[in-house]
Image (cartoon, grey):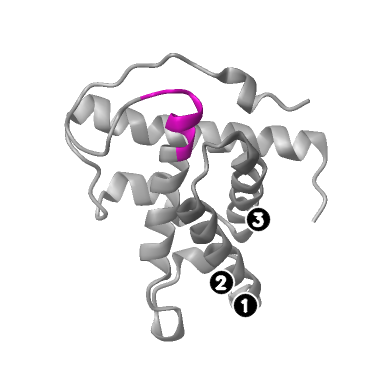
Amino acid sequence: MAYSKQDIQVGVEMFCQLAEYLNNIISETNDEIQINNHELWNTWLHSMTNDDWRMLCYIISELEFEKCVTGSDARHFDKIKRLIDKYESASNKVMDLDKHMFKGHKTIAWHGIMTVREVYNRARDIYLPNKPGFGKDKGKPDLFLVQ
């Protein structure tokens, strides 16, 4: 799928906002993010459409050359893309389904957003593991500029 410059900019903003939201949870609570965090699910995961997930897949694939996406990260987002391609006729929010034939999609979505946070942090040289600790931001904002 070809994206316009404006679509990519909106997607990059979503990518960064999601990662920053997750980092703020860790910084503010000084605790790791739990998979059953209702505010996170209500704010982000329940509202993310297939198009949102596809854009995150695109951004991850574009960042691969920057060495901030690991093979595991890329494979995880490939799995998300395949699930959306397979089940999008059933729902506009495939990754929010967790019934019968969709068992496990929410867990995959959870790992997907954690991967977004990790890739963002690697790209920006932020050390903030998903557990108590302190981070530092040396910054690499040029990775998130759409040319």
Which residue occupies 24% across, 55% down?
36
- Asked if residue 143 is positioned above or below residue 40 in the image, the reply reads above
Of the residues shown, which amino acid type is indicated by label 1?
Lys
* Residue 136 belongs to the span the image colors magenta: no
What residue sits right under mark 2 in the picture? 83
Residue at the top extreme of this rendering:
138
Which residue occupies 31% across, 44% down?
39
- Asked if residue 3 is positioned above or below residue 87 in the image, the reply reads above
* Residue 120 belongs to the span the image colors magenta: yes
What residue sits right under mark 3 in the picture? 51
Of the residues under marks 3 and 2, which one precedes in the sequence? Answer: 3
In depth, the one of 34 and 41 nearer the eye is 34
- Residue 93 visible in the current orientation: no
Instruction: Using a 10 Å C-alpha cutoff, classify the residue at mark 3 as few (fewer than 14 neighbours), some (14 to 19) or many (20 or more).
Output: few
Question: Magenta stretch: dominant SS?
Answer: helix
Q: Which residues are magenta?
A: 119-126
- Residue 34 visible in the current orientation: yes
Rendered location of residue 31, percent (x, y): 17, 35
- Asked if residue 13 is positioned above or below residue 139 in the image, the reply reads below
Q: Quadrant of residue 110?
A: bottom left
Of the residues under marks 3 and 1, which one precedes in the sequence? Answer: 3
In depth, the one of 42 and 79 nearer the eye is 79
Rendered location of residue 114, percent (x, y): 38, 46
Q: Are marks 1 and 2 in contact (CB under 8 Å)?
A: yes
**Front: mark 3 or 2:** 2
- Asked if residue 87 is positioned above or below residue 79 in the image, the reply reads below
The quarter of the rendered structure image containing the C terminus is: top right
Numbered badge on residue 86: 1
Q: CA distance from mark 1 to mark 2?
A: 5 Å
Of the residues shown, which amino acid type is indicated by label 2?
Leu
In terms of secondary structure, where does tag 2 sit?
helix
Relative to residue 135, is residue 106 drawn left or right?
Answer: right
